Amino acid sequence: MLYVYSYVLATCLDQLTNLACSDNATCYTCGDRIAYLEDQVVMKRAAAEQQVATEFPTECGECAGRVVKPVVSAACNAALGTQACSNGACYSCGSRMQYLYTTVGYSLDAALLEIAREFPVECGACRPAPVKPHPSSVSVENPVRFEYFMRSNLAPSGNMPLSYREVPSTYFDTLPTYLKTLSATGNTSVSVCAGSATGGIATADMVNAYTFQTERYLTTLGLDVYDGAVWSIAMGVLGNEVLVRRYTRTVLETGTTAGLQSIRSDVPCKGQDCDPYKESCGVCYGDNYATLSGESAMEIRLITDTYAAPGSVDARCPDLKLTWKWNDYKPILGENAWSLFLGPLTTAIQRYGSAAAIPETSKDFLLAVNFLPGLATLGVNVSEGQPGYGAYYYTAHNIFIYEGANPHAGSQVSIENQASLLAGLKGLSYVLGEMQCKDLDCHAIRCDVESRINAMQSFLLSAYNGEYFRTTGKYNATTREWAWLDTPFAADCQTWVGTVLGPQLIDEVHGKNTTARLWESIFLPSRPPSPTIQRKKKGGGSGITDAKTTMGPIFFSLHFCFLQI
């Protein structure tokens, strides 16, 4: 990158509580004025600090100086004064660059690339040179080139990214039948189709067509909140603070989107005796079937700006001409670990310059802290030393209630999800240890988080069966019995658990070179795997797949872009 921000100075932190009064005797603290410009005007943090410091030099003056003048090449500097005209509107290359950089929120490289692409003759000298990766690093040339996709692939409101972009745009229209999911084999009763000519009965073909519709619209209109987190981190690295702040402020903090009234899974639980196959029983968390609300409830994994797909007709009863509506409301622990811990905490560090500079009123920070009470309800209710202690269920009860789904998912533990949560809690513990808290008892919160971390690490280590980390366990709260499920080897589970626990701890507990042998079983295909390791077949979910995915070469995703950055 061609520009940097210095850390927030301690003197600025000291001034954040100073009252700054305008000529009309309206008084707000320096911190409140900065926050207003950041949240309501959607200015970059450094720019907001600079403006408040300029307007109130006595009260807030120490907050000036974090805005760094863009540094460009001599050739580009000479071109910045050149007029670049489009549709009769003429502005200099420098004005166009400054608008994209300061107002729209582009990083400097992205702003320069945009004006050079749009006006190659007038502004072409400002095209950033490709970044040559260090030979010792695993990288790609000029990862900044992915920024254009991540910045432009947004939902209609512009407040959130989308997980995928359909390329070509006719992909779903031309997909051959043999690549479609055709799992339905019989008629199905559909309540929303009660007034149809079939009396609410959808044939297998209708159900399969609806399944294909669902795949299309969830993919093209939705954002997995995990992708939202990695997008936020990547965009923060690239300097696009404004777009990240807009997503955090308008979606994560409000718990809503332009298409969904709530992205929190907080429908009141009707209790353990309610039959979800006969009525709506709400969302029930943990062994006590608790109800969670507000920021203590889990987020659903897939969110959207578009509740009803425009121009669509529900394939289960086409004669009624009902619009296809959003139908995925599953809260998943791993996605929440990224969306509520890893994403916001990382972007808060990027935003304020260091973990120590994060204020205890930071909404990014509070997203993680306010979820902790809800997380506690997901803990397996066993005593220390018993199997399952330290584990957390990966979802709530009454979520997977449809044909072929697992009705007991709310009593199951996903090891990969545990690893994501462990990473998130470690991140929160680090931030709490660095922050300078006054009103919030950060020490007590950190002690609680550290206790959870220690218990989770012990549990994850117990998931190792001598050859690899198992993927799933379950707990029966009635019989108080824990059991590991017979699930296939999953490569992503091994890599992620190994990364979060670390090779030193794994080898210390399970023997020298355990991690190395585990990695060899994943990354050396010429080496025959153990007979007990079964690779997952197509359709088996995450893990090593024998068949090529139909989505891989077709869809350009946020996750791919982040990995390159």
Image (spheres, grey):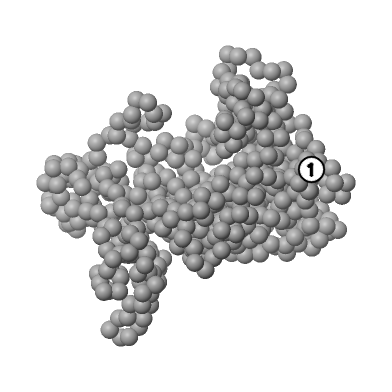
Residue ID for mark 1: 386
| Label 1 CA crowd tier, 10 Å (few <14, some 14–19, many 20+) | few
The quarter of the rendered structure image containing the C terminus is top left
For the point 55% across and 60% down, which residue is it? Answer: 442
Pick the residue in front: 363 or 234.
363
Q: Name, please, the residue furthest toward the bottom.
A: 24
Q: Position of residue 281 (x, y in %)?
A: 78, 59
For the point 39% across and 57% down, which residue is it? Answer: 352
Pick the residue in front: 338 or 57.
57
Compared to residue 256, the image places residue 562 above or below, namely above
The quarter of the rendered structure image containing the N terminus is top left
Q: Quick one: SS at disc 1?
A: loop
Residue 416 visible? The answer is: yes
For the point 72% across and 28% down, which residue is it? Answer: 465
For the point 66% across and 64% down, which residue is it? Answer: 293
Q: Position of residue 19 (x, y in %)?
A: 36, 77
Residue 525, image quadrant = top right
In the rendered structure, the answer to whether residue 240 lies left or right of residue 512 reads: left
